[in-house]
């Protein structure tokens, strides 16, 4: 059971004030993340407009099946995250821990599949740089597609790793009994972050994997 | 209405509430964090100043005879990086903003005290990275590190410097986030938005820019690092990349960044002009809204750095007209500050001298911005000393004057001591004279055609360069004097009363220095900001 | 006359005076505004300093009328400045049709220039007074910037792209040429001179010296040496489109888009032929990136410009299918 004096900061009026302010802080942080990914999306738009053939060619080399599985996995993890928040709000410790762990597992599956995809690209010499070797139409500029593919998905994966770390910390704190119906703000905040990372992927998947496929 | 600190009967003030290095390095008190920032930015300012000395010394003679070209290129690069990212961006918000915002709104602290401390550590770590890069060989790309020079040609420490700036960017983001949440959620009862001091409005607008702009710089740095280390080719024409795309991404942040620098300083000026005229700022809501207007329009003008970059004529037209628009809210502020003096009761203590300096120099700097927004004229003066003069008028004549004025004004609040007044006035004067002698000749040099970032230059430019270096030496002395007497005053300065200036504002209604939790009793606000006329008994009669 | 003032740059081009006029107007405006504000500040500071006995009753806290006046009048003034600056800019950006062409390649840390008759220069540019000159410029490495203060013109010089600048000199003399975009160690040594001569002296200069092969002739030589002619022939069934009349025409591309065959297009077609393939032709052309230097590309371009011809010989080949969008890329083996 949470002891209010351990979790309440006295510059706030009450726990509700603290929760509202924390939520505002997290939303502001997510806005910065939108701008952060936005810079890469801007590069994507510029280069796709300039080199549509290269974009088609690059997208065709991505494995839609794996990408689709990953999309389902992430959406599933957002579901388990929402269940975790719900459990926290009801003060149910065991379901909270279970759903947090499930979210971590699903996140891990996502990263595992991503690792497999990256490994394929390594074998096919499609990592940008001196070893890059692409055959076919649009060859001159396809490296740019892959540069953005790795930058975007790599940055996304990094955010997932951080998210899994945050979730792990929540598991530890939940097991120690830190959260209850009155105080579960960190769970809610990590939930917001996790959903955001999920939404970024919802954009990445069609923009990278689904070009030219009908 | 002032609270007096009596020994033994009231809470300790924040400077003595806890001793030892741990109580400082692990503090979550916004006031102590402000002091930590004060120390850090002062060190970085000294470093940036050192690089400037080398630059100006070399430029005494037309030949590149003091140091090798590559060394000189590192000097101006590191001067820019140290000053822009590690002094101008953080100084006013992280020192004065951190210290004052909770006090001004009647709160006990910022919304997220631990994040505040984290932002300082992030700043220090980023600074150490960049410091390492500077010491271990330096960097010579210019602070703007244009591609493909920075990604494919420079053989200096680009990536470590970039990493340092990337890290420090998060300090800015966290500060902005904290300020926004604080101003929204932590105001004392009765403190509506339009009763806020204009300093708070200015920092709110600044926080918007920090939040929206800094992440774009961060990702741009990541892409530059990927290009440089992994040869990704995003900005490399050989791989189909566009080096001008880098410029768009870079300036999308770096133009709003200059508003991150100036807006807080403008907030300081609003407070000072009011206090030393003993009058409410004229046109309060216009000044408040002008801060927001500058923040918003400031995001739409970045292409005015790129008129000759190869971007289309039509893009240049759009950026030009928007750049003229952004001048208007700044002009509105200057007019309103000037009007504040009308029927006021004006005194000329050191902070007020800095106000006059600011208004004069910012006006000139801002007017020269009109020159640059004019397409036909910018073609000639772009990348010349005209630009260098323009931005130094605003950064040094504007931002630093506001910072120093604010530092003097709130020094008694922060330290409980008065600085020595006559030394304060003297150094303000020395700084003003030194500044103008340094930078006014550079306008002339620029129009004559002397390009910037030149290690050696044609002989006919020497006279003006010598004037500029002479001015810089005076300016340097002007900065050293306050460094000495401010430190001296912390021990030997006159003990300050709670409100030495008789100024309005919640920060003056608590001790100098304030107790750790700012107010013995949470204040409740019933009057407007700058309510000088409501208490004629306290106002000094003419 | 203005140029004879100390600390004022010489005016040596047709547009210098216009740029200076705008500049001096702004200087005057700034001086007036600064004086007004400084004057008002000083006046108020003295009159209303603490201790003076003047009327301070009912100090206004704001005035909507004043705010409107000092927002709208400056707004109108800056819009005028914008329009003025824009009109000068249009002139700077638009060369006259009869301008002589000069090609410029910037590289760390020198300027390489070539006249239409083939005469080359390094860090110096001789031009005749009274004739417009248009520079087509590119960089071999990083971004540079071609700046002649006396002409009031400047243009960044980019790798992988062409940019242009033009001027018409009005006074004989020797004028500074500076690189104005930081490009590394010897940035401040990437300087030279533009030498403006009387027309007959210039003709003498141009004809004398090492008689260079004209760029077009050199380009034709390259065109043959590199084997371009083997695909780009006028025979039917040739692997590449014939190039007669190509320069300046509109080309139909694979997916139905069109492009104007300007300098940029031609250069791209040589170094990155897969980027925009002409409709009806297979993507077979190998890239010549790294095989032809920037000067060589200029020369081939000049040669192609001399190829006159009817454009409809190049219309879409009825018997060849357009490339299928989204098709998997061919491997090198399939291409052979």
Image (cartoon, coloured by chain):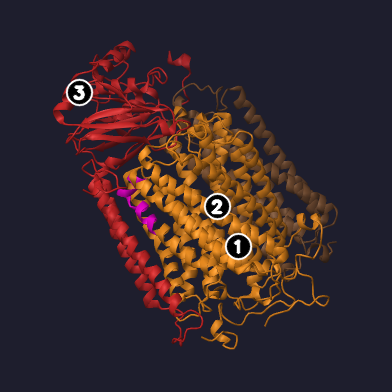
Q: Which residue is mark 2?
A: B476
Q: Position of residue A83 (x, y in %)?
A: 72, 54
Q: Secondary structure at mark 1?
A: helix
Name the colour assigned to chain B in the rendering.
orange
Along the line of sight, the residue nearer the viewer: C329 or A6: A6
Q: Position of residue B318 (x, y in %)?
A: 35, 52
Name the colour assigned to chain C in the rendering.
red
User: In this picture, is A135 found above or below B358?
Assistant: above
Sequence-first tag of 1 and 2: 1
Q: CA distance from mark 1 to mark 3?
A: 68 Å
Is C106 situated left or right of C2 in this image?
right
Q: Residues within 10 Å of mark 2 (few under 14, many from 20)?
A: some
Tell which subunit mark 2 falls on.
B
Q: Which residue is mark 3?
A: C205
Along the line of sight, the residue nearer the viewer: B487 or B150: B487
Tell which subunit mark 1 falls on.
B
Magenta residues, start to end:
B367-381
- Residue B375 lies in magenta, yes or no? yes
Q: Secondary structure at mark 3?
A: helix
Q: Position of residue C141 (x, y in %)?
A: 43, 28
Is B427 situated left or right of C187 in this image?
right
Q: Position of residue C265 (x, y in %)?
A: 32, 29
Q: Residues within 10 Å of mark 3 (few under 14, many from 20)?
A: some
Give the residue at x 79% y 65%: B16
Q: Which residue is mark 1?
A: B180
Q: CA distance from mark 1 to mark 2?
A: 36 Å
Q: Secondary structure at mark 2?
A: helix
Q: Between label 1 and label 3, give the one nearer the viewer.
A: 3
Name the colour assigned to chain A in the rendering.
brown
Q: Between label 1 and label 2, give the one nearer the viewer.
A: 2
């Amino acid at each position: 059971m949470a002891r209010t004096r351990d979790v309440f900061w006295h510059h706030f009026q009450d726990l509700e004030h603290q929760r509202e302010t924390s939520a505002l802080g997290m939303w502001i942080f997510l806005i910065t993340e939108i701008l952060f990914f936005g810079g890469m999306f801007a590069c994507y738009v510029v280069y796709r407009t300039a080199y549509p053939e290269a974009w088609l060619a690059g997208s065709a080399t991505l494995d839609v099946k794996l990408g689709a599985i990953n999309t389902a996995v992430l959406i599933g993890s957002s579901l388990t995250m929402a269940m975790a928040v719900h459990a926290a709000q009801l003060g149910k410790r065991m379901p909270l821990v279970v759903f947090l762990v499930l979210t971590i597992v699903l996140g891990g599956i996502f990263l595992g599949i991503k690792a497999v995809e990256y490994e394929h690209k390594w074998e096919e010499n499609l990592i940008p740089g001196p070893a890059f070797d692409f055959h076919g139409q649009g060859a001159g500029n396809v490296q740019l597609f892959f540069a953005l593919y790795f930058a975007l998905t790599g940055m996304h994966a990094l955010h997932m790793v951080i998210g899994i770390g945050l979730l792990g910390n929540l598991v530890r704190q939940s097991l120690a009994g830190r959260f209850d119906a009155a105080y579960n703000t960190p769970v809610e905040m990590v939930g917001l972050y996790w959903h955001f990372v999920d939404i970024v992927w919802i954009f990445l998947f069609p923009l990278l994997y689904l070009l030219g496929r009908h | 209405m002032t609270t007096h600190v009596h020994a033994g009967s009231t809470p300790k003030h924040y400077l003595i509430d806890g001793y030892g290095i741990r109580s400082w390095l692990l503090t979550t008190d916004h006031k102590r964090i402000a002091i930590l920032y004060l120390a850090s930015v002062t060190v970085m300012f000294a470093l940036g100043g050192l690089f400037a000395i080398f630059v100006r010394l070399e430029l005494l003679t037309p030949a590149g005879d003091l140091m090798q070209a590559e060394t000189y290129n590192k000097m101006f690069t590191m001067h820019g990086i140290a000053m822009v990212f590690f002094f101008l961006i953080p100084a006013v918000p992280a020192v004065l903003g951190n210290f004052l915002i909770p006090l001004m709104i009647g709160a006990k602290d910022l919304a997220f005290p631990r994040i505040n401390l984290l932002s300082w550590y992030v700043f220090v770590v980023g600074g150490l990275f960049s410091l390492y890069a500077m010491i271990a060989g330096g960097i010579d790309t210019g602070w703007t590190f244009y591609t493909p020079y920075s990604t494919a040609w420079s053989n200096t420490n680009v990536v470590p410097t970039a990493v340092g700036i990337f890290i420090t960017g998060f300090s800015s983001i966290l500060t902005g986030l904290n300020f926004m949440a604080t101003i929204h959620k932590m105001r004392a009862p009765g403190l509506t938005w339009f009763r806020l001091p204009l300093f708070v409005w200015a920092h709110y607008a600044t926080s918007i820019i920090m939040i929206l702009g800094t992440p774009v710089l961060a990702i741009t740095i990541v892409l530059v690092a990927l290009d440089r280390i992994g040869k990704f080719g995003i900005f490399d024409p050989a791989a189909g990349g566009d080096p001008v795309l880098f410029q768009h991404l870079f300036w999308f942040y770096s133009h709003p960044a200059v508003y991150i620098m100036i807006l807080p300083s403008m907030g300081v000026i609003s407070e000072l002009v009011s206090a030393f005229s003993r009058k409410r700022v004229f046109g309060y809501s216009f000044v408040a809204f002008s801060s927001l207007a500058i923040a918003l329009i400031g995001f739409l003008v970045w292409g005015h750095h790129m008129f000759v970059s190869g971007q289309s004529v039509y893009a240049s037209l759009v950026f030009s007209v928007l750049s003229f628009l952004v001048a208007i809210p700044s002009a509105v502020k200057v007019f309103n500050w000037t009007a504040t003096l009308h029927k006021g009761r004006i005194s000329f203590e050191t902070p007020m001298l800095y106000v006059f300096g600011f208004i004069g120099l910012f006006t000139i700097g801002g007017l020269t911005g009109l020159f640059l927004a004019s397409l036909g004229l910018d073609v000639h003066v772009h990348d010349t000393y005209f630009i260098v003069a323009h931005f130094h008028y605003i950064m040094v004549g504007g931002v630093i004057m506001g910072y120093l004025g604010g530092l003097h004004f709130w020094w008694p609040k922060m330290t409980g001591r008065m600085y020595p007044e006559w030394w304060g006035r003297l150094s303000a004067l020395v700084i003003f004279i030194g500044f103008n002698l340094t930078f006014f000749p550079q306008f002339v040099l620029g129009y004559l055609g002397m390009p910037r970032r030149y290690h050696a230059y044609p002989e006919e430019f020497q006279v003006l360069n010598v004037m500029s270096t002479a001015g810089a030496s005076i300016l340097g002395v002007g900065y050293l004097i306050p460094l000495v007497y401010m430190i001296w005053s912390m021990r030997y300065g006159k003990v300050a009363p709670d409100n030495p200036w008789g100024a309005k504002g919640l920060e003056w209604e608590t001790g100098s220095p304030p107790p750790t939790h700012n107010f013995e009793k949470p204040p409740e606000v019933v009057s407007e900001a700058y309510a000088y006329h409501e208490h004629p008994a306290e106002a000094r009669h003419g | 006359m203005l140029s004879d003032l100390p600390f004022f740059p010489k005016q040596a081009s047709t547009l210098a005076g216009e740029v200076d006029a705008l500049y001096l107007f702004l200087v005057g405006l700034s001086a007036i505004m600064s004086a007004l504000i400084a004057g008002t500040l000083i006046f108020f500071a003295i009159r209303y300093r603490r201790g003076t006995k003047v009327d301070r009753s009912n100090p206004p806290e704001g005035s909507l009328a004043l705010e409107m006046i000092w927002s709208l009048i400056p707004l109108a003034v800056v819009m005028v400045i914008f329009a003025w600056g824009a009109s000068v800019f249009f002139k700077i950006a638009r060369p006259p049709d009869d301008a002589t062409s000069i090609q410029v390649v910037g590289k760390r840390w020198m300027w390489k220039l070539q006249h239409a008759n083939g005469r080359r220069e390094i860090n110096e540019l001789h031009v005749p007074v009274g004739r417009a000159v248009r520079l087509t410029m590119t960089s071999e490495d990083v971004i540079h910037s071609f700046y002649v203060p006396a002409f009031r013109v400047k243009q960044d010089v980019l790798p992988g792209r062409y940019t242009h600048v033009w001027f018409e000199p009005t006074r004989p003399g020797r004028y500074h040429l500076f690189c104005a975009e930081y490009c590394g160690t010897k940035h401040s040594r990437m300087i030279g001179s533009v030498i403006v001569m009387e027309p007959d002296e210039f003709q003498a200069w141009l004809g004398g010296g090492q008689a260079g092969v004209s760029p077009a002739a050199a380009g034709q030589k390259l065109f043959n040496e590199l084997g371009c002619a083997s695909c780009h022939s006028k025979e039917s069934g040739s692997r590449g489109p014939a190039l007669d009349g190509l320069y300046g025409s509109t080309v139909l591309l694979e997916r139905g888009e069109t492009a104007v065959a300007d300098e940029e297009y031609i250069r791209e077609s040589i170094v990155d032929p897969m980027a925009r393939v002409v409709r009806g032709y297979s993507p077979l052309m190998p890239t010549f990136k790294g095989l032809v230097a920037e000067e060589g590309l200029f020369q081939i371009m000049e040669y192609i410009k001399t190829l006159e011809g009817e454009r409809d010989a190049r219309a879409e080949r009825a018997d060849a299918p357009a490339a299928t969008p989204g098709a998997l890329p061919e491997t090198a083996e399939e291409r052979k």
